[in-house]
Image (spheres, grey):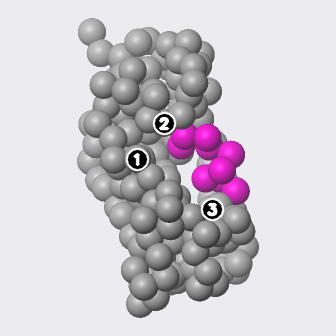
Amino acid sequence: MKNKTSARFASIDFETADRGADSACAVAVVTIENGEIVNRFYQLIRPPRQEFEFTYIHGLEWEDVRNQPTFREIWPLLEEHLKDAKFVAAHNAGFDRSVLNACCAQAGVTPPRIRYECTMTLARRVWRIYPTKLSDVCRRLEIPLCHHRADSDAEACARIVLAAMENGVAFR
């Protein structure tokens, strides 16, 4: 029997342009209710600087985002997707939390006060998976992944949480 929660939770993933936590260039949020994915949100973001250090990881460069909205412009949409979530899941949650907080600070908006669940920690605790890179966890749990695409990474995190719920993990 599946251990489904009626609570709403979200998973989030950011891609960044450079080493600055405020350099988000893509974000995705996947919303889950009653154990089912009910919404997917993906948005490219124009970061505050034109320099892209991590194109080799995610494939994004300035030309892809130069005409996209800034974080401040997408914040109302992003905030709506996080609203009413019991928690937010992310792989290496400290990274995504720091990006969200830095982007909110740079945009002059208040970040949501929300609990984070780290799917990297969850994978270690529930399945004893090592190493715990998202690609390793997804391979082990047979979750499809196009790694370092924010939409795919966020959905994979949601599916990791759902798999943990099926394994009897309760999220309070």
- The Cα atoms of the two marked residues, 2 and 1, are separated by 8 Å
Do callouts 2 and 1 mark residues in contact (Cβ within 8 Å)?
A: yes
Q: Nearer the viewer, residue 155 or 169?
A: 155
Element type at mark 3: helix
Q: Is residue 92 magenta?
A: yes
Q: What residue does disc 2 label?
A: 134
* Amino acid type indicated by mark 1: His
Residue shown at 41% from the left, 90% from the top? 67
- Disc on the earlier residue, 3 or 2: 3
Query: What is the residue that sits farthest to the front in this orientation?
Result: 56
State how many labels appear. 3
Q: Front-most of 143 and 31? A: 143
Give coordinates of residue 171: x percent, y percent: 53, 26
The answer to whether 81 is drawn above or below residue 3 in the figure is below
Query: Is the C-beta separation of discs 3 and 2 under 8 Å?
Result: no
**Residue 147 shows which numbered tag?**
1
Location of residue 37 with respect to 148 vertically, above or below: above
Q: CA distance from mark 3 to mark 1?
A: 20 Å
Region rendered in magenta: 90-98
Which numbered dot is residue 100? Answer: 3
> Which residue is pictured at 31% across the width and 31% down the height?
143
Give the position of the C terminus as an image quadrant: top right
Mark in front: 3 vs 1: 1
| First in residue order: circle 3 vs circle 1 | 3
Nearest to N terminus: mark 2 or mark 1: 2
Mark 3 crowdedness (10 Å alpha carbons): few <14, some 14-19, many ≥20:
many
Q: Amino acid at mark 2?
A: Leu
Q: Is residue 78 magenta?
A: no
Q: Left or right: 108 with respect to 7?
A: right
What amino acid is found at the position of numbered circle 3 in the picture?
Leu
Q: Nearer the viewer, residue 87 or 59?
A: 59
